[in-house]
């Protein structure tokens, strides 16, 4: 496993981090579904054995179960693994009460990185900004957190304003070969001494679904498109760690091997990827990472992320048959939710979309396309 100095924190962080947002799920005896605990713990332990030393979770991931499972997986590994979770700023319970709740769920005495979750320009204008920063500084002084961090979904130019507050040690933001908007912001953060972690290096699984011929056409020897995506991110000297939401042992093995032996893409290979991606500009209008932050707010349970994934398979990659299969499977078997025709255009989803996608407009386009393919 390759490691990088994590800003000015003194941490030596693995190039690959474990994003605990998409842990494997199982059906339980009472008919409910939830995290497959034993399977998830086995995945964490294998990743730790392979040298991964950074885990990122959040209060509401996996229906609130992620932190509990992460805490169980860290038993026996805590002093060898850096732990990160997040404070949802708009939560009524407040900073200190939320932090203490998360420490209990994780069953740990301290956090290595505690992020203000998904902040942007609005955070700078928050009426309780000074109070929250003071609470974070106090928690750090008491040893409950080692580093104050933030995760970010706003426009790139806003990141510098947040760093200017002068309290943050690291930043977590979106970056991959399909979405490179944060490149200048990452360079600025790195130059100012922050550790940098990127989410979505394989685009919530979207990039892993690229046609396998892509790398071959670019003359880049890789085993998969997921490897291509990770190596692209790791080629950026301003990225310390790439988070991957792994939910299968094969993903652990492949991604850790990439971070261990493959090395980043060469400058020439990066340029080839950049040129190829310029031809896929259409994706920018419908770049959905599959975070599913929108889904709990849809009154009709429209499976937005799967619909958009199907649309991109058709529109960007020309995989129309695969796209139709993805769309038709919604509401069948283990694929929950409703298709695009169930959207009533209430707009609740758009209020919670980190990518600020015009979801209602895009769902109309999706409905028209897949009805025409029926």
Image (spheres, rainbow, N blue to C red):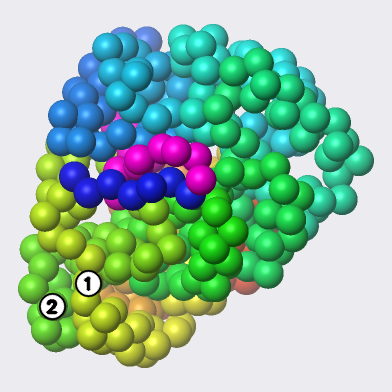
Q: Residue 239 lies in what quarter of the image?
A: bottom left
* Quarter of the picture holding the N terminus: top left
Q: Residue at x 34, y 83 (%)?
A: 274
**Image point 13% across, 60% down: which residue?**
262
| Residue position for label 1 | 265
User: Which quadrant would residue 153 be assigned to in this image?
Assistant: bottom right
Residue 363 drawn at (x, y percent): 55, 66
Quadrant position of the C terminus in the picture: bottom left
The magenta segment is 8-26
Asked if residue 59 lies left or right of residue 272, the reply is right
Q: Nearer the viewer, residue 235 or 22?
A: 235
Q: Which sits earlier in the primary sequence, circle 1 or circle 2?
A: 2
Q: Quick check: 246 left or right of 31?
A: left
Which residue lies under the disc numbered 2?
Answer: 220
Specify whether residue 283 is painted magenta: no
Circle count: 2
Please indicate whether residue 131 sits to the left or right of residue 103 in the image.
right
Q: Residue at x 51, y 45 (%)?
A: 8
Give SS at disc 2: loop
In the image, 104 versus 325, the foreground residue is: 104
- Discs 1, 2 touching: Cβ within 8 Å: yes
Residue 158 in sight in this render: yes
| SS label for mark 1 | loop
Residue 249: where, in percent of width, then height? 15, 36
């Amino acid at each position: 496993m390759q490691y990088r100095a994590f800003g000015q924190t003194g941490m030596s962080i693995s190039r690959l981090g474990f994003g605990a947002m998409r842990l494997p799920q199982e059906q339980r005896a009472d008919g409910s579904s939830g995290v497959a605990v034993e399977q998830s713990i086995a995945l964490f332990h294998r990743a730790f054995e392979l040298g991964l030393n950074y885990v990122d979770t959040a209060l509401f991931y996996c229906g609130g179960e992620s932190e509990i499972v992460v805490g169980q997986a860290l038993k026996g590994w805590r002093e060898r693994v850096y732990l990160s979770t997040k404070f949802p700023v708009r939560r009524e319970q407040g900073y200190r009460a939320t932090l203490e709740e998360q420490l209990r769920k994780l069953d740990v005495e301290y956090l290595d990185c505690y992020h203000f979750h998904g902040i942007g320009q609005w955070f700078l204008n928050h009426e309780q900004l000074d109070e929250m920063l003071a609470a974070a500084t106090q928690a750090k002084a008491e040893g409950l957190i080692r580093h104050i961090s933030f995760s970010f979904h706003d426009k790139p130019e806003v990141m510098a304003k947040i760093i200017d507050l002068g309290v943050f040690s690291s930043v977590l933001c979106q970056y991959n070969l399909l979405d490179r908007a944060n490149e200048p912001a990452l360079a600025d953060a790195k130059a100012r001494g922050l550790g940098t972690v990127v989410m979505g290096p394989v685009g919530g699984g979207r990039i892993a679904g690229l046609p396998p011929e892509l790398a071959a056409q670019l003359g880049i020897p890789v085993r998969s498109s997921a490897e291509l995506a990770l190596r692209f991110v790791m080629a950026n000297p301003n990225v310390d760690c790439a988070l991957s939401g792994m939910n299968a042992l094969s993903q652990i093995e492949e991604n850790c091997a990439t971070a261990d032996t493959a090395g980043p893409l060469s400058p020439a290979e990066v340029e080839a990827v950049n040129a190829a991606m310029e031809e896929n500009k259409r994706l920018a209008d419908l770049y959905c990472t599959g975070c599913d932050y929108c889904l709990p707010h849809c009154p009709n349970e429209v499976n937005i992320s799967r619909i958009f994934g199907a649309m991109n398979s058709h529109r960007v990659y020309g995989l129309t048959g695969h796209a139709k299969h993805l769309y038709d499977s919604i509401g069948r078997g283990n694929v929950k939710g409703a298709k695009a025709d169930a959207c009533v255009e209430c707009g609740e989803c758009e209020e919670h979309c980190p990518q600020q996608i015009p979801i209602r407009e895009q769902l109309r386009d999706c409905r028209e396309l897949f009805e025409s393919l029926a």
